[in-house]
Amino acid sequence: MSCLKRKRVIATAIQYLYILRNDGWRIAETFYWPSLGITVWGYVSTWTNQGTGGLFNFLGPIILWEATAQGIIAIAINMIDELNASSIVSLFSTPLSIREWALASVPTSLLTSCLVATYCSLLAWLLFGYNPLSMGWPLLPIAINLFGFGVAIGLACTALLLRVGLRIKSLMYMLSWCLFPLAGAFYPVDMLPQWLQAITHCLPLCHLFDIVRAQNMAMYIAIYKLGVATALTTLYLAFSFCLLAYAFRKTLNHGLARLTY
């Protein structure tokens, strides 16, 4: 971190981790929705795909998506907490930069995603005997790419919060599930209208979930799709960091205090 101060990033990250640990309602909400998704989709897939491997097609994607969605929320909710507490002015009156704040928010998102993924995997194993590790070697790069894309979306939501304020705080919940139909998690994106397919292929999600759904995909095809997804994830991450920095500069020109009203 050349122009970034490691101590400021670590101190801010620890602050958000302590807030997460002491907020019982947030912890309960973090695990409630994944529990509901695993249970409902698990029994639906068992009923509609008896003996046809439906659990693989439904539970694997829903575990990965729940972890991604909660990671998105964990990024944006840090800024919402600052706005709700009217502490954003005092926060950025310190030497802390917006880039340092963004990096400090990543550990909270990573911890939330890992906990949700572990919890959902355990729940899927207890209820349905499904082991996500059966996906094999692609699981790790897929999870890393999904987490990276989740961080990018979370930072983009934070940028909008800085420009508009708390009026759009529900957007972080809406946006994650608005992307879900475009992800191709449960079905090939070829089933979508042509104009939607053009959008989905610009997202890393469809390339990643293609690998999850295809149990017998050739190695070279899987590597190619992972390469495309990684390139797109990197692009979205770079764009979201630039968008956040731009939104912060514009907000500074109009005054951070207006966001607390």
Image (cartoon, rainbow, N blue to C red):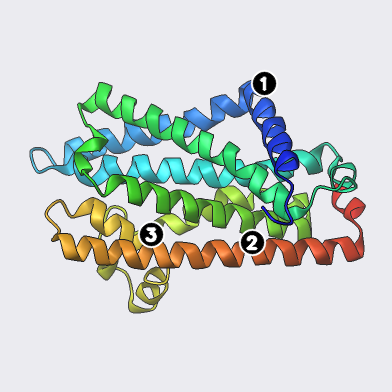
Considering every residue shown, the one lying at the far left of the view is: 51
In the image, residue 49 lies at what x, y percent? 14, 42
Image: 165 above or below 10: below
For the residue pair 173 and 141, the one nearer the viewer reads as 141
Residue ID for mark 2: 241
> Which residue: 55% across, 47% down?
72
Image: 191 above or below 149: below
Residue ID for mark 3: 205
> Which residue: 88% across, 45% down?
94
Tell me the kind of residue under disc 1. Answer: Asn
How far apart are the two marked residues, 2 and 3, measured between alpha carbons?
19 Å
Image: 123 above or below 137: above
Residue ID for mark 1: 22
Tell me the kind of residue under disc 3. Answer: Leu
Element class at badge 3: helix
Residue 51 located left or right of residue 202: left
Number of numbered discs present?
3
